[in-house]
Amino acid sequence: MTNAKQSLLKQLPAVDTALKEAAVQHLLLQYGQVTVTRALRALLDTWRQQILQEQWGAAELAQALADLPLALARQVAAAEQPNLRPVVNATGVIIHTNLGRSLLAEAAAAQIAQVANSYSTLEVDVETGARGSRYSHVVQLLCELTGAEDALVVNNNAGAVLLALAALTAGGEVVVSRGQLVEIGGSFRIPEVMAQSGSRLVEVGTTNKTHLFDYERAIGPETAALLKVHTSNYRLVGFTEEVAGRDLAALAHEQGLLAVEDLGSGVLIDLHRYGLMYEPTVQESIAAGMDVVTFSGDKLLGGPQAGIIAGRAEYIAKLRQHPLTRALRIDKLTLAGLEATLRLYLDEETAIKEIPTLRMLTTPVAELEARAVQLVAELLPLVGKAAKIEVVPSLAQVGGGSLPGYDIESAAVAVVPQAISPDELEKRSRLGQPAVFVRIYRDQVLLDMRTLQPDEFSSVREAVCQALLGR
Ligand SMILES: *Cc1c(COP(=O)(O)O)cnc(C)c1O
């Protein structure tokens, strides 16, 4: 090691000495000895590395030493932050898988908090005091809302599909259209799930067209079920045809087979009525005669992560007894959130108002524009000449593999930074506190009002100012 490096390293304070500095005392009071000491060690380590790697000379080190209390305060604050923490979603993608899909309604979040630090009726029959079933809390609600005879909930929809196939079709063949061999992000692929379940996939039809006679011809002595999979994250357009659920279910029953449908998102209200694109509802699938229907809790339903299985009582009973059900068991917090969410659906108007996913989907554009105007008015005086800021029309997306290729009219605040690139502004916003996730479109940084909530405006103002002006 060079002498210069050695003499710089010697200037690094001992941990004990640094902790005695007057400017550090308030940190010790606030966070305690252990936390501050750990942060200080980490900080001095990074400084040591800067010196060893010759990134720092005497001047840089002197500056760092002078700023030690501030740097330590930042280090402690950063270390105290949870890794999984809230962020602001200004991307305009409503069911943003990477940002946590659906936000829960207030009632659902409150119910989770209630059950979290209290004993609960999870698996007890209050009337008799005997052991009860955790699944019972949502069965009635699900039956009422979907028209199904019975229902079961598990960890997520991928688990629901696997369980349904493992319990009902293992050892047999399951016929699926080639147009519906879906892959969902995170390596959920119908052919592979089929194999895991112990069922054999029989593909029929072509990528773009599958007819009823394709299913008919594929049925043999080994056939156990006909499976319809909703192509929830892609769309076939043009010269295409798929068999309606009603016809598929009728054929299955004629032949003594099961009709199963993986709906993916699983919506409980008719989105068409709100000017959105049609998405098949769970009720329709049940009414069409499907024996078992599976869907997600946290996509268009707007609840917590869960897999919901609704259908005929005799099949749901079989699922309940399968060993995978225990392995895929839904936890009590999810169950509390799911029950509260489902209760909101008993009145559609309440559901639209209270469930954030539905509210964001259905907010009129004029209202979003008014919010954008408001945010621009708040930002302009703060930002000055550091950026051009205006209201622009925008296109939001449902996301989460729901309603693919379908844009929703929206309004956004467009920020064009003058001294830094849009990419740099995006990065700084993402690294800010709280992190703000934005979208870049044609060299503008867009803050989309469809996903940005009015009560997040102050966070956004702060984040944008910090990112643009460094304060
Ligand atoms: C999203 C989706 C799944 C997986 O659901 P998760 O709740 O994410 O496990 C399965 N099938 C389809 C068609 C889907 O859209």
Image (tube, grey):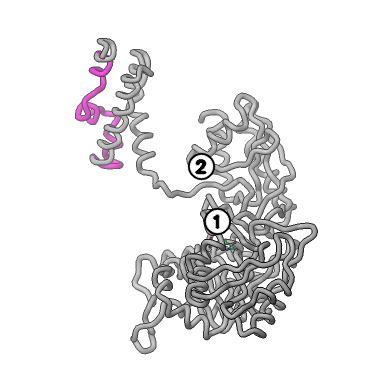
Q: Which residue is mark 1?
A: 101
Whether the residue under disc 2 has CB within 8 Å of ligand 1: no
Q: Look at 59% across and 76% down and name the residue there.
A: 225
Q: Secondary structure at mark 2?
A: loop
Residue 182: in magenta span: no
**In the visual, does 207 lie left or right of 28?**
right
Which residue is rendered at x = 68% and y = 38% of the image? 441
Q: Is residue 49 above or below residue 337?
A: above
Give me the C-alpha separation between circle 1 and circle 2. 17 Å
For ligand 1, give the image quadrant: bottom right
Q: Which residues are magenta?
A: 7-33
Query: Pointer 2: what residue?
Result: 435
State left or right for residue 247 relative to residue 439. right
Q: In this rendering, would 236 be left or right of 187?
A: right
Check disc 2: other Cα within 10 Å, few if <14, some if 14-19, many if 20+.
some
Which residue lies at the image location 68% right of the left edge and 50% below the top edge? 396
From the viewer's perspective, tell me whether residue 320 is left or right of residue 455.
left
Whichever of callouts 1 and 2 sits on the residue coming sooner in the sequence is: 1
Q: In terms of depth relative to the viewer, which is nearer, 96 or 448?
A: 96
Q: Main secondary structure of the magenta part?
A: helix
